[in-house]
Image: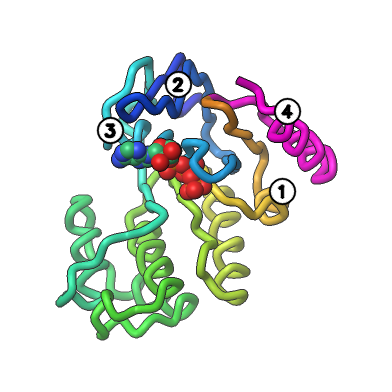
Amino acid sequence: MELIYIKDLSKAYGKTKVLDNLSVSFESGKIYGLVGENGAGKTTLFNCIMGATDYDGEIRKSSQIEVGYMPAESFFYSLITGKEYIEFCIKAKGKKMDAKAIDSLNKIFQLPLERFASDYSTGMKKKLALMSLLLQDNDLYILDEPFNGVDLYGCIQLKRIIRDLKNKGKTIIISSHLINTLHELCDEIDFLHSHCIRKRYIHASIDEIEKEILNMVEFKTT
Ligand SMILES: Nc1ncnc2c1ncn2[C@@H]1O[C@H](COP(=O)(O)OP(=O)(O)OP(=O)(O)O)[C@@H](O)[C@H]1O
């Protein structure tokens, strides 16, 4: 089932064109990877999907799906503990708190939930944002650079969690610069370059993907 359908999406910041007639769609139950150079527009695409910014073109979402978005950098108020942050996010989504689920997930993430979130390290902040998202039971998870700053153990666990989500029929879209990790995890990998999705890789080898991306970047498509 098609969850998100995007047709001719264009977005510019002032005179800077970021996305130009981008078309792509995402089906349920799959893991999608999104790669692209720094500044290619991955976060901008996510912001458009989430309705966090204006755009031209069409974005259709399947009705009644709940979308959880983890931005590349989350904001934490200074006097709020990790636990309070999780509670806030769950309540904001209109979901019920489940202390057991928090404890069980924190056996994996091992966060000091009684400490102020603003004092967490980069990786701990990322884990906290992920934890609060995973506790919301969404249909679609959009994760902007979820592996950034997360330690090796955390990355291994995160890959397991993402696979579990897929096994539960959820859809996940992950932006990352870690092509090996995406290749391991994803059913399909989209390459965003020169303002639109240049290629969707399905069952391609890492070599093939890397070679093509190098070619496209070096002989920049305009
Ligand atoms: N609020 C904004 N105002 C003006 N320009 C912006 C804004 N947000 C993003 N941009 C510009 O849009 C372009 C795309 O940025 P975006 O953050 O979407 O890229 P990205 O692919 O996520 O990059 P990275 O891999 O470095 O995180 C960049 O040139 C960036 O400077």
- Residue occupied by mark 2: 6
Is residue 85 found left or right of 3 in the rendered image?
left
Pair 4/3: label in front: 4
- Give the spatial CA distance, label 4 vs label 1: 24 Å
Between 147 and 93, which is closer to the camera in this rendering? Answer: 147
Residue that badge 1 annotates: 183
What residue is shown with label 3? Answer: 53
Secondary structure type for disc 2: strand
Judge whether 70 appears above or below 59 on screen. below
Disc with the residue nearer the chain's start (1 vs 2): 2
Label 4, label 2: how far apart the Cα atoms are: 27 Å
Mark closer to the chain start, 3 or 1: 3
Residue at the spot of label 4: 219
Disc with the residue nearer the chain's start (4 vs 1): 1
| Nearer to us in this view, 6 or 163 | 6
Q: Residues in magenta?
A: 196-222
